[in-house]
Image (cartoon, grey):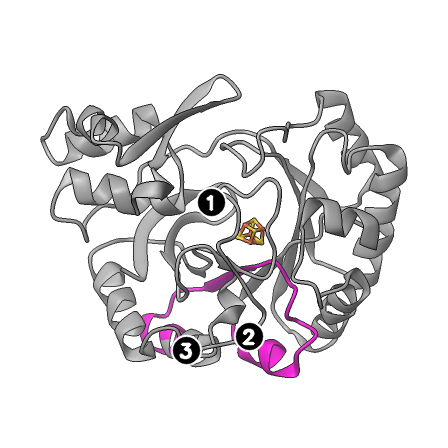
Amino acid sequence: MFAYGPVPSRRLGKSIGVSPIPAKTCSYSCVYCQLGRTDHMQIERKSFSPKEDIFCDIEKVVNTSHADFITFAGDGEPTLCKDLGWLIENTKNVFKLPIAVITNGSLLYREDVREDLKNADVVMPTLDVGNQALFEILNRPFKTVTFEKMLQGLIDFRQDFRGQIWSEVMLVSGINDSVKELNSIKDALARTRPDRVYITTPVRPPAENWVESPDPQNILLAEEIFEKVVSITEQETGDFGVMEFSNAREAILEISARHPLRVEQALKIERKFGESGIVEQLVNQSLLDKRSYRNTVYVMPNKSRL
Ligand code: SF4
C-alpha cells in the first residue's frame, strides 16, 4: 500500500500520505527516527515500484476521503524514488490538492531531484545541525553526504523553487540545544532562506533509547535565537483515515508501521471497525510491540516478525 490516510498532521491539517519507497529506506539514520534505525541506507535513486501502481493507490485514497494536502513522505526518504517528479506532476494535475514533500534534503545537491520537486507547493526539508560533527552524530548520513554538500543543495534549491520551504529543526536534549549549536543552526538557516521554520522535538519512540526532548527553557532559547519560528512540541490530535482498509488488524499494522500509534489511537481504530481486542491480540501474537516514551504507551510492528 503506497497511499494512506488522511493522517492528522501538526503542520498540514489532514494529509494523505504517500510512500513511494520500501520500508525504512533512507540516506540518513537519525537517532530520533520514529521508524527505528535505517535498514536500507542508500543514495541511489530507483523506481522501487511501478509508478502507475503508486498513482492508482493515491487515486483510491483521494476518492474516499477529504484532505488538505497530499504529502510525499513515508517510510524513509521520498526523493530516493526516481519517479517522484512524474508522481507529483500527475497527482497535482488530476486531484487539484496542494502537494507537500517531507524530505531530509540530502539529495537536493542533485539537479534531477530539484527538478522533480519543482511542482510541489510546500517542501519541508530537515536542517537539525550547523556543522559536520553534529551532522554525523544526529543524522548519521550515508558516507558521501557531507554537511556542506547537503547545505549547498538547500541553498541551490531555494534559488529556483517558487513554492514554500518550511524547514524543520528537530531538537534533541544535550545534542543540538545549546546556545552555541542553536546559533550555528541559525547561521545555516539564514543561508537557506526558508519561508518558515518549525522546531520539533521527539514525541514518539526514537531509534535510540537515549534520545530525549530538550527542557522547556532550551526550546524557548531556540525560539529566541531563530527567526520566524513555530514550535511544535505536542502530540498531534485528530483521527486517522481507515477507508482503504478492510479490518482493524490490517489498519493498525499498516498505520503503525509508518506512524507509531498511541494505544488510545489504536483502540479508536478498532472501534471504527466495530471490533475489540485486536490490539491485545496483535501484542500477544508478537506482531505489535508496546513501547513507552514520555509517559505515553505506543504500539508499533515488531520488526523481527516483519
Ligand atoms: S527521520 Fe527521516 S531522514 Fe531521519 S532516518 Fe528517519 S526517515 Fe530518514
The residue positioned 78% from the left and 69% from the top of the image is 152
Q: Relative to residue 178, is residue 279 drawn left or right?
A: left
Is 249 a magenta residue?
Answer: no
The residue beneath circle 1 is 35
The answer to which of 171 and 196 lies nearer the viewer is 171
Q: Is mark 1 within 8 Å of ligand 1?
A: yes
Q: Tell me the residue that label 2 is attached to.
A: 44
Q: Name the residue that disc number 3 marks.
A: 47
Label 3 is placed on what type of residue? Ser
Q: Which mark is residue 160?
A: none
Instruction: Give the spatial CA distance, label 3 vs label 1.
Output: 22 Å
Mark 3 CB within 8 Å of ligand 1: no
Q: Who's the residue at 69% across and 72% down the image?
A: 157
> Nearest the camera: 300 or 306?
306
**Observer able to see residue 256:** no
Earlier residue among tags 3 and 1: 1
Residue at 22% in and 46% down: 242
Q: Tell whether circle 2 marks a residue whose Cβ is less than 8 angstroms from ligand 1.
A: no
Q: Amino acid at mark 1?
A: Leu
**Residue 221 appears left or right of 194:** right
Would you say the residues marked 2 and 3 are in contact, meaning their CB atoms lie under 8 Å apart? no
Residue 42, horizontal then vertical, whole percent: 56, 66
Secondary structure beneath label 3: loop
User: Which residues are drawn in magenta?
Assistant: 91-120
- Any magenta on residue 92? yes
